[in-house]
Amino acid sequence: MRRAAVCLALLLCLLWTGAQGEDGGGTGKKEGEFDIQGAHDQSSSQTQMRTDIWAELKKLRDMAIEHRIKIQRLEQDNTVLETKMSSSEKEVEEVKRENAAFESRMSSSEKEVEEVKRENADLLARVTASEKKSTAFESRMSSSEKEVEELQRENADRPQVAFSAGLTNAGAVGPFTTATTLKFSKVFTNIGQAYNPTTGIFTAPVRGVYYFRFNAWETRLTWTSIELFHNDKRIMVISDLHDGTGHVSASSAMVLQLEKGDVVYIVMPSSFGVYDDVFNRIIFSGFLLFPQ
């Protein structure tokens, strides 16, 4: 609008200046002389000039209107742009806030990651220590397993000898007129089959140290006595007298070093008796302590 007004003012000035120039140029008449033809021509020229001025003014008005419309559109566009800019600024602020919150969370996450890393490092250290302990334990286990296997092989190679037998279920045994080897016929255990219930004799299957235990029991009013023999040598004698108070008993044990093939057995001397029944009152037992 301003530009159009300025242009209009300049145009009017130019037109006025041109009109003045045409009046001052004259027709060559002296002052006071009246030229009818000149007056007519001047009137026609002025009319044409006014027509041209109005045409120019109309053009300027149209241009001013067009510029005003453009300016209004520009103002509307500026308003829309300013609205968009304001919205964009709000969005930018929101993005900034979100970025700040995200950075805060990132910082917190980084701290958590560092904490997790430290925990993982501690866990790794403990796992490494546990693995070392496990390796040492496995080594000891392997060594122990080897020792157990060695002992198993030794035990497998080592003879297993053990027996335990009761005398009889018949009750009273003896007295006899001669010394008699007692046959313990009720076999409870006979590992290695070294004891013979038919003869009552134990035969050492290997050279070694053996443990033997035996006892006597009697209910009759008489002496009771039994003897432990190693081969043909009497090793121990146990005896007791029944004095009428119910029963008598005696027991003992012996550790013997035997050669392979040596025998051990129980002998009841003549004129003595023992008593056994289903309650297994008299037992003869023995086992190998260790071979030599």
Image (tube, rainbow, N blue to C red):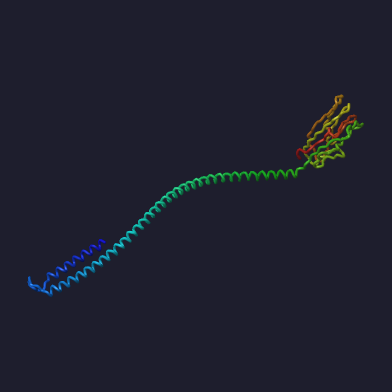
Q: Residue furthest bottom?
A: 37
Q: Is residue 111 left or right of residue 164?
A: left
Place of residue 85 in the rendered image (x, y in percent of width and height, measured from the top left): 37, 56
Name the quadrant of the N terminus.
bottom left
Place of residue 136 in the rendered image (x, y in percent of width and height, measured from the top left): 61, 44
**Residue 228 position by quadrant:** top right
* Residue appearing at x 65%, y 44% in the figure: 141
**Residue 79 position by quadrant:** bottom left
Above-or-below relation of 112 to 45? above
* Residue appearing at x 66%, y 43% in the figure: 144
Q: Is residue 83 left or right of residue 22?
A: right
**Residue 50 position by quadrant:** bottom left
Q: Is residue 142 left or right of residue 209?
A: left
Q: Nearer the viewer, residue 79 or 125?
A: 79
Place of residue 292 in the rendered image (x, y in percent of width and height, measured from the top left): 76, 40
Above-or-below relation of 110 to 259? below
Q: Nearer the viewer, residue 140 or 14?
A: 14
